[in-house]
Amino acid sequence: RKEVEQDPGPFNVPEGATVAFNCTYSNSASQSFFWYRQDCRKEPKLLMSVYSSGNEDGRFTAQLNRASQYISLLIRDSKLSDSATYLCVVSPFYNQGGKLIFGQGTELSVKP
Amino acid sequence: DTGVSQDPRHKITKRGQNVTFRCDPISEHNRLYWYRQTLGQGPEFLTYFQNEAQLEKSRLLSDRFSAERPKGSFSTLEIQRTEQGDSAMYLCASSSGASPYTEAFFGQGTRLTVV
């Protein structure tokens, strides 16, 4: 079983749609959680951190359920510019290393 | 440019040759990571440094791979006796590690093609 697993893609949605991505992680001791975005042939960039209480940044909402070891990302009113691959990222044992473990990514394509 | 820089951006090599990649992290960052990414997959962790100390190396990494960060600044990743399966994008990232939620910044990567 992979340490971080994401919904298989691609997701093809029209502009203005709401889309949700799901992610599960296997290490219950994981301490930090993120969503990164990767555009085609570009490097990953941080989209948002995911806090235990859930957090929102404009059209983006991230949720964390530690009991279920589940992370989600909701994108409302999707734009053409949201087309990218979304990577779920988990960091275990911060004080012992802080490495980032990536899921395989979910590709989103927003169409006019 | 104060971001993470990687050199070269592209490398084509014949099977069996050795290659070396360089990463220059953001200057005040003490943590440096190497990842490998193939098409359709997320970045796969290879190794990690805090300052000059290599703290972890992936079990998936064969003995042909070695990384150094001699003065806690730039890092090199060497692949010996390259194989076709080594073809991938090699990404370097750095962070300050100031908190569990410190952002890691990635370079643009080195694309390796082994022919």
Image (cartoon, coloured by chain):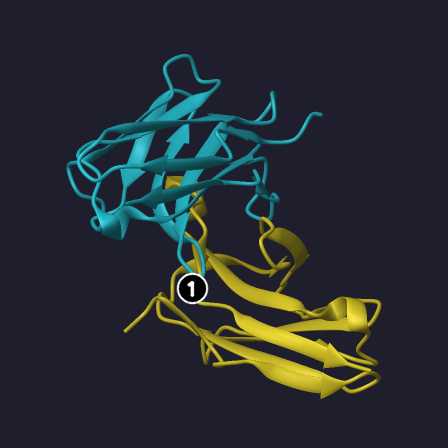
Chain colours: A yellow, B cyan
**Whole-percent x, y for residue A48 in the image:** 68, 59
Q: Looking at the image, is A94 positioned above or below residue A107?
A: above
Chain bearing tag 1 is B
**Whole-percent x, y for residue A79 in the image:** 82, 74
**Whole-percent x, y for residue A31 in the image:** 48, 57
- Would residue A81 appear left or right of A12 to someone viewing this image? right
Q: Residue at x 42, y 64 (%)?
A: B41
Query: Can residue A73 be seen in the rendering of this structure?
Result: no
Image quadrant where one finds the C terminus of chain B: top left
Task: Name which quarter of the figure residue B75 lies in.
Answer: top left
Three-letter amino acid code of the residue under disc 1? Gln
Task: Name which quarter of the figure residue B56 lies in.
Answer: top left
Task: Name which quarter of the figure residue A4 lies in.
Answer: bottom left
**Whole-percent x, y for residue A10 in the image:** 56, 80
The number of numbered discs placed on residues in the rendered structure image is 1
Image quadrant where one finds the N terminus of chain B: top right
- Would residue B110 appear left or right of A3 to someone viewing this image? right
Q: Looking at the image, is B32 positioned above or below residue A25?
A: above
Q: Looking at the image, is A53 positioned above or below residue B62?
A: below
Q: Nearer the viewer, residue A85 or A103?
A: A85
Q: Looking at the image, is A9 positioned above or below residue B5?
A: below
Q: Nearer the viewer, residue B27 or A83?
A: A83
Q: Residues within 10 Å of mark 1 (few under 14, many from 20)?
A: some
**Residue that mark 1 sits on:** B41
Q: Secondary structure at mark 1?
A: loop
Q: Residue at x 61, y 59 (%)?
A: A40
Query: Can residue A60 be seen in the rendering of this structure?
Result: yes
